[in-house]
Image (tube, helix red, strand yellow):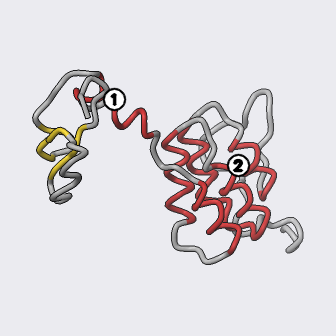
Amino acid sequence: MMNDEQKPKEYDAVLGGNNPPPVDGLVLGGIDGVKNRLASDKIEVRIAAVKDALNYQDEGLDLVINALQDESRQVQLSAYKSLRNREEDQVKQALANYQPWNLRERFQEYPGYRGEYTEVFANRRVENFNIDTGIVSPVNIAYAIRDNQNS
């Protein structure tokens, strides 16, 4: 029978079931296990690690904040969702600096960004911006400033 010190804690990873242990590695529990999984090549493993990291107080919180910079947008989104309702100052600062999307990537989805003239941009009617009249109605209108316009 195991004494209490040998029993796994609530958030420790343990081997069990029908899965064999890793051939060339070991399974780490606790914060070291989370760090190890965050370094994985597999996105799903990193996402699961982000979700587990907050169980480890400040050190886990720092790991989730760092995951906002992960190369995978999916991991970034998981970190963002884990942090967005938190009140800590370092979380608020990290979220203020976090860009959930790349503006250039977003615009490249729209034909008008590639230099083609379109009548609709971002579900809004496109009008050429006129410096003399300015922005008349900002609702449902996308104003186009084109470099070949005479001002």
Q: Nearer the viewer, mark 1 or mark 2?
A: 1
Q: Which one is nearer the viewer's eye here, 9 or 107?
A: 107
Picture residue at 72% right of the left edge, 51% below the top: 34
Q: Are marks 1 and 2 in contact (CB under 8 Å)?
A: no
Where, by quadrant of the figure, is residue 106 drawn? top left
Residue 76 spot, x, y in % from top left: 55, 47
Q: Position of residue 96 (x, y in %)?
A: 58, 61
Count of numbered tags: 2
> Where, quadrant-wise, is the C terminus in this rendering?
top left
Give the residue at x 71% y 67%: 90
Mark 1 lies on a secondary structure that is helix
> On residue 108, which mark appears?
1
Front residue (pair 97, 76): 97
Q: Position of residue 124 (x, y in %)?
A: 15, 47
According to the image, label 2 marks what residue? 15
Q: Which mark is residue 7?
A: none
